[in-house]
Image (cartoon, rainbow, N blue to C red):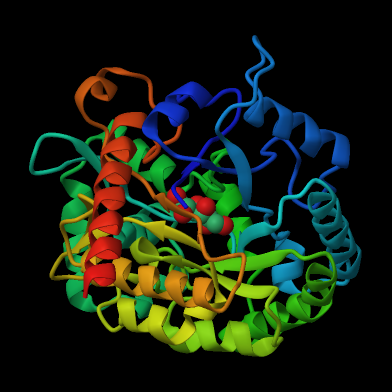
Amino acid sequence: MESWRWYGPNDTVSLSDIEQAGAYGIVHALHHVPVGEIWEVHDIKARQNLIERDQKTNKARNLKWVVVESLNVHESIKQGLPERDELIAKYTESLKNLSECGINIVCYNFMPVLDWTRTSLDFIYKDGSKALRYDVKALAAFDLYILKREAAIEECSEELKQEAKEYLEGLTEPEVRTLTSNILQGVPGSGDTMTVAEFSKYLEAYDGITRDTLKENLRYFLEKVVPVAEKYGIKLCCHPDDPPTPIFGLPRIVSSEADLNYLVGSVESPANGITYCTGSLGPDANNDLSGIIERLGHKIHFVHLRNIQREEDGSFHESDHLDGSVDMYKVMEALVKESQRRNKEGRTDFAIPYRPDHGHQMLDDLNKEIRFHGYSAIGRLRGLAELRGLELGIERGLLNS
Ligand code: DNO
């Protein structure tokens, strides 16, 4: 199902724009509710009404809020602190409320402190549009010389330290500030950017939390939440780490197929699934993207499609949807097959919602204010159009074969 992320009334892309882009599924969150608080039924219903009805004419729009992205998990749950039980109870209450409103796909992630991380939000792509980029040197420069994290000195190779130093020396003061704020953007949609001091404090809270502890904390969360989700017909789907590698010494536990297997194996239930994201799994060349769908497709409840171009040193930038290191044809073919398989089995969830995850800032959007980087209209419109064509071509091809 063609879907689109909408950030809410302060999104510069309107609901009518989304209708014109041809998407049907809306991906949305109550961004104004602080992480850890309950999403109340009246609040969800008000937003649903705003999305699904034209407020001027009161006519139904051809849009439906189908996915929550994200019902974020509180840091205390990730850290396994004593208050986690109370927070988990609130989380399950929100799930129950969402189910009461008929919304049953809920995305979340288990990345400590930072959600997706980029070093540049206006990288000039080969065609002159602007894209997001992750540069290993820039991240190391921030880590070593701005954040001054002690353990980074041991974690980085001598070569990387030297490159990072040279990189930083080449930046002007405003460029250093931009790099810092790009990295510290925090949770998308919140509009909050942390200070370096706040970030250091958040990192300290993870002292002693190893990969294994974080995995245990994920399992604890799932053991409590999944049975409730199952009871209310909610499909939870964990978004992979972006990028799929530990950063700032923080453990990352949803980066590979083995990690995804741990996730779904922790609690066996149709309510315990995956948000499949090519842009997050793709930077690691070891991830077999279409193979993951072939093997774990039955656990995929929601899909993000975006391409990335891997660079030699582990850096990457976001390329056009059909051009880059991800073989989008193979990915879409595997998804179409999964959807057909479900349909044959008589399952009602065969139209798996997918969205063009990020797009370039291009054409007229280059002159507009961008509130949510990666989420301007025209680049995603192009992405969705390309993906839609690819999907149709594959569906027809399979029918005729
Ligand atoms: C990036 C998105 C992520 C995603 C969350 C899911 O644009 O894919 O921010 O929404 O990580 O929890």
Q: Give the vertical position of 75 relative to 130 (above or below).
A: below
160 or 118: nearer the viewer: 118
Name the spot of residue 155 as percent of width and height, x first: 37, 78
Residue drawn at (37%, 80%), measured in percent from left and top? Answer: 154
Name the spot of residue 138 as percent of width and height, x first: 27, 55
Which image quadrant for residue 136? bottom left
308 or 18: nearer the viewer: 18
360 or 252: nearer the viewer: 360
Which image quadrant for residue 104? bottom right
Is residue 326 in view? no
Name the spot of residue 13 as percent of width and height, x first: 45, 25
Residue drawn at (33%, 18%), measured in percent from left and top? Answer: 368
Q: Give the vertical position of 44 relative to 10 (above or below).
A: below
Which image quadrant for residue 372? top left
Residue drawn at (49%, 69%), measured in percent from left and top? Answer: 240
Counting the numbered discs, the total is 0
Q: Give the vertical position of 365 relative to 165 (above or below).
A: above
Outermost residue toward the top in this view: 56
Is residue 331 in view? yes
Name the spot of residue 111 as percent of width and height, x first: 56, 66
Outermost residue toward the front in this view: 400
Residue drawn at (62%, 61%), measured in percent from left and top? Answer: 108
Q: Give the vertical position of 385 relative to 351 (above or below).
A: above
Outermost residue toward the left in this view: 126
Q: Quadrant of the C terminus?
A: bottom left
